Image (spheres, helix red, strand yellow):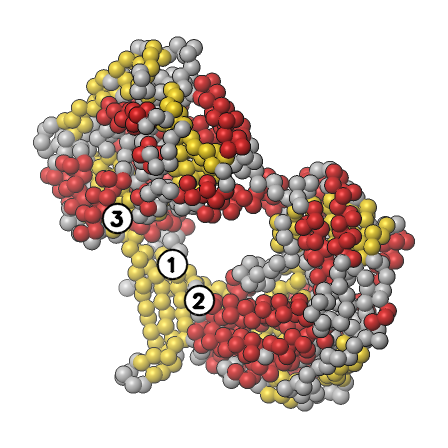
Amino acid sequence: MTKSSIVSIPSNTKDVKIMNYINGEWVHPTTGTYIDNYNPATGQKSTPIPDSSSVDIDNAVQAAKAAFPQWSATPVAERAAILNRIADLIDTNCANLAVLESQDQGKPVIFAAAADIPMCAQFFRQFAQYIVKGISEIKSQTNTQATLKNITEMVPSVLKSTTQHVASGVAALITPWNFPMLVVCEKLAPCIAVGNTCVVKPTELTSITPYLLTQILQVAGVPPGVANFVFGTGINAGEPLVKHKDVRLISFTGGSLTGSRIGGIAGSLLKRVSLELGGKNPSIVFNDCNIEHAVATNVRAAYQNQGEVCICSSRQYVERGIYDQFVKGFRQKVLEEVRVGDPSNQQTFYGPVVSKQHMEKIMNYIRLAQEEGAKVEFLVNPNDTMVKSVSSDGRLTIKGLEGGYYIAPTLITGIKQSSRVVQEEIFGPVVCVLPFSTEEEAIILANDTQYGLGATVWTEDGDKLMRVMKQLNAGSVWGNSWGVSDECMPFGGMGCSGTSREHGKWSVEFFTETKALYTHNQS
Amino acid sequence: MSSTKYKLPNLPFSEKLIYINGEWVEPAGQQSAKVENPDTASIISEVPECTVEDVDRAVQAAYAAFHDGPWVNEYSGAQRRDALLMLADEIEQHRAEIELIESINTGKPISDVRGELDDTIDLFRHFAGYADKVEGRHIAAQTNAKLQGYTTKVPVGVVGFINAFNYPICLLAWKVAPALAAGCTIVFKPGPQTPLTTQYFAHLLHKTGRFPPGVFNVVLGGITAGQALVDHDLTDKIGFTGSVATGKQVIRSTASSKNVRSASVELGGKSPGVVMPDVDLDKTAELVVSGCMSNAGMNCNALTRLWVHRSIYDEFLPRLKNAAEALVLGTPQDEQTQMGPLIDERQYKRVLEYIRIGREEDKAEILTGGKPVPERGGYWIQPTLFYNVDPKARIATEEIFGPVLSVLKPFDSLDEVIEIERKNEFGLAAGIFTHSHKDIAKFTRKLRSGTIWVNNYNGLYSYLPFGGFRNSGFGRELGYESFDGYLVPKAIIDDISA
């Protein structure tokens, strides 16, 4: 592929050929082999992914290492200009990127175009602005009594101290398949903004838009070696990357199991690590909520992006006084408005789940709930002409897309708090609704999992809202809302949901090393 | 005949002397002023009226202490912190005496004074915590990495304080604690009616032995001393609590002397309360009455104009009446007394005049009270509620500074209340009583008031800023913001290229 000053993003995955991007060049994996990749909407094969190995990883890390001294010394205004150009290029190519994201991941095109892709650009603009404004260091000056000349003589003196944030070195960015391009940008933007270089290893399930991003980076003028992309599996590419002696820090978003493994490796090698993991996020709906608003938002929070959202409201606790009304309203809302099918169709609310394996995993949970005697409903409108059939364990067969990985909007009631279906992250369009009686009980139930990523509270009583929000053990808590964010706020989880916070100044803190500098003089 | 069983204790300092430059000294002039117990209108003490010369002496001492003394030039933040902590301990040890003196001098119920001493002690400890945490910023400059830009924060310098009479020791703490923590030196003038606890404070400060001479100085008196302090060129900042008229004069003085000085002024309020239909009426009536009548209404953030929703208006009024009439008036030093007298004759006459204006000019109706209480001998007025008051009435818009609440005509929508309150001359505080989080969000977002209470009133805390918009003044007391107000940033740019 030749270098170009224009980015040409095709509109179909068939026209994309994914290659590794190392030191500013697109190259084949050294093994020469590729992994099969599937379009989840159809179950058909799509563009294959390089099956990279530790050799490719080493090449990429070396490139990043070599590029580090110059990039970290590049004046802030220049780095910011590059980041702003990346943002502009993402915006310009939004439509095609959204189509390809949808084909690779399964999410509806309209959501990718309206939310995902624009947010990618925002991350670059935000961190460009951040570094231009200047990272604020703490400076202190104090009078002190100290020994200067010899051990016994204390003299009045002045101590001046300042912090200094510096770039850390080569970072490993390992990203998931639910928001393929978004999470790459979320990490890449602050990482290179502060002067680091990196190797990005996106999940093999959704590598297309990350690959296309490399074309944007090239045209935007990111120097060779600053951002390298190596595609492949966790075992063959991800693990060598995490273990590589020249990788100083790792930012990972994905499942808790993999996160635990990465954390273990990073810890043993004394690398700094940020883990953003899963969630089993509660929603608490009180009698005195705005029920229409609560139902509408909770439906969205359950099923948007196929429920493949780390902060999805997958456990919904409803106060007994409105329980029946809520469930009825929820059911009705889904039947009326949530259509599952072709992600390129404007009417589709959510598309297929990302892979066959993931679909099987979700259906296992559905079957488990059925075995436990819970009430499991598949909320598919009988008049929905897109749906050919619904299997007994929730799989949808969509007309014309019979090979695709579709799961019905699943509502589970009559299930115990201790059930695995309530406790474990399913990451699909499956929601459990349980009743509660008192405020205290709701808080206990909400906090009762190993996770702690997100939570929502629904009540019109202003005091109760704040009181309850403050007692929930979750990194982000929403009152009468879900999923909205302010870019300066931290994002991350408690417990098995993760170990760190990112976004805003938290990302800057993570990606930099902080030093303390002291000068000390006699007054 | 009112009780004389509570007498001023023996004071550990001489009432004839003033504290300047670490010593108790004779004032320059001969003038003195009597100090009253407003419960009985009896004289309890006599203190000097300072002259221009006294004030100059005090400011010179503060100036030398700041520029040449060890307080800022040698002491670390930690040393200033420890000095303040020790001072807090001294106040705590002697609090019983201070409480009695304050109650006798101001007429405040002793139970209220105890809360004020809790706050006073807490404030010195709270701001001690900032003394060793002064931070500047260091920013790597943009394209030219060879330049280093950083800020350092330095204390503003010599601060002149003019205090009001309504919370003598407590407002002293509001002002002095952050200013000392920041490394400033001070000349402090209490309200002329209430000098005693300020003097006691100076005595305790001296007793700690941790404050070098000149760091804290007191001048006593009224207009002469006040004007001299406000005009003095060697001050760097003036902190003032008082009326709008005097406050404006203070600001003018800081601009018209040889040396421009900064100011922080807290000038009063006409704070509105809003009662929506979804609240517990009994509980809310108590909160409203206490919000207005606390300190006999001599409280700049008192709730003095009340909006009550039409749908609960008739049910709410009798509850307000009962709550106001239930207040126990009596000897302030008795435990069960809940409300005291006005501070002096001038204030007493002013409040009675406003009650007359309410009746005769504003044509407002009285729900309860409206009369003085002559049996006690001092400056007592009953808790007074007017109702159906026009929002534009004089009693509803002008600060009375007494135990008088105007319950306005009933309202229908919160939007109309917010629109009217936009034109409130003052903007110090406000309160809303409702559980609707939408209404809370709207009210707290739209009202330009320095403090907004939701389902409570009057609580102020060391860690939250207090101050006003518009004629309530500018600058903040309490909170980190007040501490920061006693610091000034310097920016230093350094070329570190080879």
- Write the residue at 22% across / 37% down: A201
- Residue at 78% over, 52% down: B321
User: What's the mark number on residue B366?
Assistant: none
Q: Amino acid at mark 3?
A: Val
> Which residue position is annotated with label 1?
A137
Badge 3 local density, few (<14 within 10 Å), some, or many (20+)? Answer: many
Q: Chain of mark 2?
A: B
Q: Say which quadrant the C terminus of chain A sits in.
A: bottom left
Q: Give the amino acid at mark 1.
A: Glu
Rendering coords of residue A370 (x, y %): 32, 24
Of badges 3 and 1, the one in the foreground is 3
Q: Is residue A413 visible?
A: yes
Q: Residue furthest front?
A: A373
Judge the density around disc 1: few (<14), some (14-19), many (≥20) Cα neighbours within 10 Å. Answer: many
Callout 3 touching callout 2 (CB < 8 Å): no
Alpha carbons under labels 3 and 1: distance apart:
23 Å
Give the Cα separation between the discs numbered 3 and 2.
30 Å
The residue at which mark 2 appears reads as: B133
Q: Secondary structure at mark 1?
A: strand
Disc number placed over residue A273 in the picture, else none: 3
The alpha-carbon separation of the residues under discs 1 and 2 comes to 14 Å
Rendered residue at 48%/20% (across/down): A332
Please give the name of the residue rendered at 36% of the width and 49% of the height, measured from the top-left corner: A506
Residue A406 can be seen in this image: no
Q: Secondary structure at mark 3?
A: strand
Q: Position of residue A269 (x, y in %)?
A: 17, 52
Say few, some or many: other residues with alpha carbon within 10 Å of mark 2 (under 14 / 14 to 19 / 20 or more): some
- Read off the chain for label 3: A
* Mark nearer the N terminus (3 vs 1): 1
Whether the residues at callouts 3 and 1 have beta carbons within 8 Å, the answer is no
